[in-house]
Image (cartoon, coloured by chain):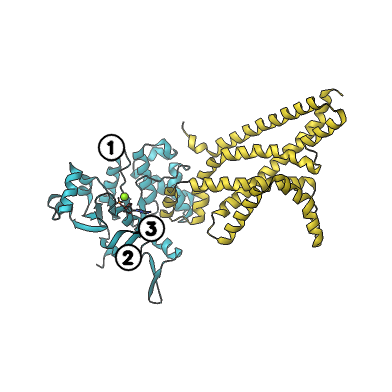
Amino acid sequence: MTDAIIRFDKVVKRFGDLTVLDELDFEVKKGEKVSIIGPSGSGKSTVLRILMTLEGIDGGVVYVDGEPLWHELREGALLPAGEGHLRRMRSKLGMVFQQFNLFPHMTVMRNITEAPVKVLGLSRKDAHLRAEELLDLVGLADQAKKFPHQLSGGQQQRVGIARALAMRPSILLFDEPTSALDPELVGEVLTVIGRLAEEHDLTMLLVTHEMRFAREISDRVCFFDRGQIREEGTPEELFTDPSEDRTREFLKAILD
Amino acid sequence: MHWSEYLLPLTEGAWVTVQLTVYSTILGGVLAFVFGIGKLSSNLAIKSVSVGYIEVFRGTSLLVQLFWLYFALPLAGMAIGIDLRLPPVVAGVLALGLNIGAYGAEVVRGAIQSVHQNQREAARALNFTPRQTLFNIVIPQAIPEMMPSFGNLAVQNLKDTALVSLISLGDLTFRAEQIRNFTQDSTTIYTLLLLMYFGMAVVLTIIMRIVERFAGRWRMAGS
Ligand SMILES: Nc1ncnc2c1ncn2[C@@H]1O[C@H](COP(=O)(O)OP(=O)(O)O)[C@@H](O)[C@H]1O
Ligand SMILES: [Mg+2]
């Protein structure tokens, strides 16, 4: 319990009449690599979006680094968090989006340096150095001057990863990072994510349909179904010997 | 009087028209950004003022606005003891600028809203403030979207300058009327007038195209 860097405590999330998360309990330890799998519409993106503060919650408490994310403790009461608190909490997290969401009007270099300069207050020079290291890491050292539309989808997503890393988050969220890619470009992105998982103590939360990859890199896999974790365990347990019928059906459908 | 003798006074008038167009388009552009962004503000006061401005100036005719600024405002000023008499040029630029600014504000608002929500979310995830998101992420992407409409508005504005001849400003139309009254040579004068306005519109369109390309140059990089 104590070393949980992320904890969902009976979190409820509704969109109108639709209850997407129904008293979800969920934990991730510091440095852990967790994959979330499950059918479309089961609330996987919602979990990441709540963590990234893109989506509020309707009940329960989310803890990041031991502190409530969407609440502030004031005079002993948990009150809805103000923008200042959200900004401070947000700096612990980074997100890689399914559609990359690069800034199309900025070069690759600018995409990676803009937030470190404007948000963290780094000098252009330092931000530049940091970006060069990251571009090296994702194998795009020679693409710094290009605009996003001049890159392939796989390259764009690797820039997306570098952009998120430039803010030095301790938790990195991936929302189906390869789902928008042509099949032949998936590998290069997975290679980068795999290398990150191996070499960094970053906490990683990955929503994916790439089962083989999830199996390789994860410490733990969670099967989401209708806003609940139906089953979780080590990749070995979950993939080779799932105990729930729903998990088995899902895996069978996706692996065929 | 040979038709070539018309050219000097007409050119002088055209120069006034050019100045009116340039100043009022710049004023309109500034107003368009201020009130287009203002209309999207979460601050109710800013939002109301912006909506009010846009609706008033789009909902009344330019001619009435012009007459109001030039004839009614000084009287209103006199009633409360302030001198609000405006030189014709100022009244003309103000009326034209306020008018085009109201239409431009709707263009700015639409272009800002057309920027994909994805972009705002990416900016939020990177912890940009709402203001930084607006000015560094959203507006730079919205500007190329605005440019074709701004081009049309600028040409519209050029044509509308003819109305200021009614407050005796010596623009192209005013000069043409003067010569026509003197020579009764309507055909030649109106033909020249037509050609000169058209020529100016062509030049203005070309300028706006260049600005448009410049504003959207990142879209064309490498192609
Ligand atoms: N902004 C929204 N408004 C209304 N419904 C939404 C919104 N975002 C997600 N949903 C709904 O919430 C459910 C869970 O969505 P999501 O978390 O994106 O699922 P997943 O990522 O597992 O496919 C879906 O039924 C989806 O339609
Ligand atoms: Mg999803």
Answer with the quarter of the image where residue A84 lies: bottom left
Residue tagged 3? A55
Which chain, by letter, is cyan? A
**The numbered mark 3 sits on a residue in which chain?**
A
Q: Which mark is residue A63?
A: 2
Residue B95 horizontal/vertical position (percent): 71, 47
Identity, as a three-letter code, of the amino acid under mark 3: Glu
Q: Is mark 2 within 8 Å of ligand 1?
A: no
Does residue A109 appear left or right of residue B45 in this picture?
left
**The numbered mark 1 sits on a residue in which chain?**
A
Label 3 close to label 1 by CB (< 8 Å):
no
Measured Cα–Cα span from mark 3 to mark 1 = 30 Å
Q: Is residue B69 visible?
A: yes
Residue tagged 1? A183
| Nearer to us in this view, B48 or B16 | B48
What secondary structure is found at the residue carrying circle 2?
strand
